Image (cartoon, coloured by chain):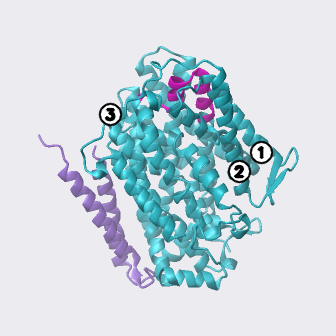
Amino acid sequence: MPLHLQLHWIDILIIVLYFAFVVAIGFRLRGQMRTSEDFFLSGRRVPAWITGLAFLSANLGALEMIGMAASGAEYGMLTSHFYWVGAVPAMIFVALFMMPFYYGSRARSVPEYLRLRFDEKTRALNAVTFAVMTLLMSGINMYAMALLFQAVLGWSMSLSYWLSAGIVLAYTITGGLTSSIYNEVLQFFLIVFGFAPLTWLGLREVHGWSGLRARLAGLHLHGYLHMWRNMTHPGQNPMGIEWFGLVMGLGFVLSFGYWCTDFLVIQRAMAAENMNAARRTPLIAAFPKMLFPFIVIVPGILAIALVPLAQWPQAGGHVNYNQALSLMIARFYPSGMIGLGLVALLASFMSGMAGNVTAFNAVWTYDIYQSYLRPGRSDRHYLQVGRWATLGGILISIGGAYLVGNFNSLMDYMQLVFSFVNAPLFATFLLGMFWKRTTGHGAFWGLLAGIAAAAGHFSLTRSLGGPGGWLGVLHTYPSSMAQNFWGAIWAWSLCLLVTIGISLFTAPRSETELAGLVRSLTPRPPAEAAPWYRRPVGLAAAVAAVLIFLNLWFR
Amino acid sequence: MDLRQAIGLLFTFFGLLLSVYGVAHAGAGMVRQGVNVDLLWGVVLAAFGVGMLLLAWRARPRR
């Protein structure tokens, strides 16, 4: 059954007001963009609550919003592993142990940290892969969102692309990172207020959590509200993964690889006003991150409990779980609220794109253009280059969106290649920050070995019904998710071993050069006499306590 | 520019718009689960918006 939302004038008015508002923010900030550091790092003067919410929102692209609700419908509370195991522990780690080096080294980007710590080739590898992946991910996000808008509103794909790209361009080219960050904070509140009523009204209809449990039992969806109960063997749960692969693959390798090294999120913390604010940034983000399952995953579960499967939209002969959010909006939102819900989706879509583009233009300008193409120009010149890079980045994103729209399987392959590149990264950073003996040659070849290991693992194994096994099948995984997690574990381990091995046979840099870049050669930040919520360690303890409680409660 | 002021303005405006629309169209398909969603949620949005404006006003730069 196709699903259509009818827009009334009030919905359109709300959407138009939102568009006007974000562009106005960009223009209000225009006067503050005097140097390249203003444009790329917000002049390093943003308060912690703003960088914290932006840290969270930069990652909340359209794919995430649609995908997490879909996954909630398909797998239930198992999906919350992506938050309570696959994100928050890494956010605590980056805040306490890694931010002192990112912020303290005064590096202007993550690739630049790699040059300070290791050498040019390691930086170049990271900068180029990051720049390419960021723009293509932005394109994939655009495509996913435009697809949804085409399905529920009947908008053409091109209208969605050019309208949203035009508005994102207007506010990022004027206000740079600050504008992107401000809109991410706005997006955070819009998502919370735009989706929370779905959970509230849905739970009202099923008569609360116990009513939801009873309904799911009636549908034979047992264990849908638990995250650890069916994790002993891969065969017990629909994700096809056991606890060890999940904790190591998702909770450690993939999650730490993303939250601790991806410049898209780290850039927000680098923009903070001081070291304390930079370290608190991921922790302030962690509180709402822990609660997000209740507004993005639970609506998906409610959708499966409330809407009979026969009434779900189909795609390619299968139930299209990606429509979970729109089904819920259609069921519970009258005119006006529909506008608010769509604004929340649009906001996640646009600030996802803006986040990718602002991270891209900093890496492009600092780590590629200034380093290899045109060094030694005036700061003004680089500011101009950054503005043009914004335009270029958005156009390439749109190109990427059209590309995946025309060649659908390309999207899967691109995400596959990205996972190869990302999987080993955390091993490199871990060794770089905590073992002063690690050398540039070790880091570079370790990274390449890790990427090769991920690709090799994929070529030698397959998952039921999935691709892979091009060179032979040594093992068959019950799901592509399990294959992905285990591939990451292999890539990380090989990167770690190769980096250690090569480092032992190559000359390390002198200790004076590594001050501020490696833990054993950096003075600890002094203990502050402030209330617990102003101290990173105090906040981290509070986050950990809530996290443990949630894991136990929903076990 | 104080971000709290910007967020406060937008949410107050959205809240007023929704609650007025909810009152004007009360009955006509506005009620879900026994609740006039636009009216009630509009009030919540406006309250949040006003709260943000108050925070911004308290922190305003003084000469």
Question: Which SS class for mark 1?
Answer: helix
- Residue A15 magenta: no
The letter of the purple chain is: B
Give the Cα distance between marks 3 and 1.
49 Å
Residue A502 screen position, x and y as percent: 67, 25
- Residue A115 magenta: yes
CB of mark 2 within 8 Å of CB of mark 1? yes
Q: Which mark is residue A486?
A: 2
Give the Cα distance between marks 3 and 2.
47 Å
Residue A510 screen position, x and y as percent: 50, 17
Q: Residue at x 56, y 81 (%)?
A: A213
| Mark 3 or 1: the one toward you | 1
Q: Residue at x 35, y 75 (%)?
A: B39
Check the residue under mark 3 and report the chain it is in: A
Q: Is residue B30 left or right of residue A419?
A: left
Which residue is under mark 1? A457
Q: Which mark is residue A530?
A: none
Q: Colour of chain A?
A: cyan
Magenta region, main secondary structure: helix
Which residue is under mark 3? A32
Return the residue nearer the eye: A206 or A261. Answer: A261
Q: Residue at x 45, y 32 (%)?
A: A519
Q: Is residue A257 above or below residue A286?
A: above
Q: Is residue A359 left or right of residue A449?
A: left
Give the Cα distance between marks 2 and 1.
9 Å
Provide the residue span drawn in magenta: A105-130
Question: Which SS class for mark 3?
Answer: helix
Question: Which SS class for mark 2?
Answer: helix
Residue A156 screen position, x and y as percent: 62, 56
Give, as a three-letter code, the residue at label 3: Gln
